[in-house]
């Protein structure tokens, strides 16, 4: 995963926002808050990854899923290539979210068990 120029420009902003969330969660709920924030980010990233191709299994969305498959079959080669590229970019950013989530979970729950319970 290569960083583009805009990624390098936005990286300090992302780090500042994440540090703000981490500090806020720590001030409100301690290390347990960091772990919970990490779990929330991880669940959201996993859910987005599961639904990247459209609706997933639910009784309410069976016809919607069939319509999405039918629409994908009628796409041109260029549209399919564009969709694959969009999915690739989405998965790149989701992998970053999963790493951040794992860091928050490890730090939050690890320090909670170390300092609060240990």
Image (spheres, grey):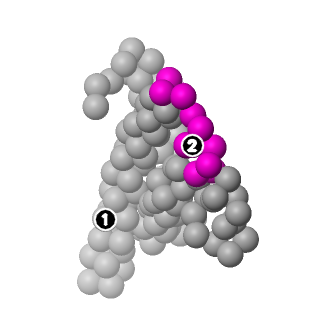
Q: Is residue 76 magenta?
A: yes
In the depicted structure, whether residue 106 falls above or below residue 89 = below
The residue to which callout 2 is attached is 72
- Could you tell me which residue is drawn at 45 percent across and 72 percent down? 32
Q: Is residue 73 something one can see in this rendering?
A: yes
Instruction: Mark 2: give few (<14), some (14-19) or many (20+) Cα within 10 Å.
Output: some
- Could you tell me which residue is drawn at 53 percent across and 69 percent down? 29
The residue to which callout 1 is attached is 106
Q: Is residue 23 left or right of residue 92?
A: right
Helix, strand or loop under label 1: helix
Image quadrant in which you'd find residue 74: top right
In the depicted structure, whether residue 70 falls above or below residue 11 = below
Q: Is residue 105 magenta?
A: no
Helix, strand or loop under label 2: helix
Report the number of discs.
2
Q: Is residue 51 left or right of residue 84?
A: right
Residue range corresponding to the magenta coloring: 68-79
- Could you tell me which residue is drawn at 36 percent across and 72 percent down? 109
Task: List x then y, in percent, for residue 82.
Answer: 49, 28
- Could you tell me which residue is drawn at 26 percent across and 83 percent down? 118
């Amino acid at each position: 995963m290569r960083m583009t120029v805009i990624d390098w420009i936005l990286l300090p902003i992302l780090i500042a926002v994440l540090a703000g969330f981490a500090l806020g969660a720590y001030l409100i709920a301690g290390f347990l808050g960091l772990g919970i924030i990490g779990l929330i980010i991880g669940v959201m990233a996993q859910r987005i990854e599961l639904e990247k191709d459209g609706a997933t299994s639910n009784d309410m969305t069976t016809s919607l899923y069939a319509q999405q498959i039918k629409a994908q079959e009628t796409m041109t080669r260029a549209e399919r290539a564009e969709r694959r590229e969009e999915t690739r970019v989405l998965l790149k950013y989701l992998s970053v979210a999963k790493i951040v989530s794992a860091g928050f979970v490890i730090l939050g729950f690890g320090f909670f068990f170390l300092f609060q319970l240990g």
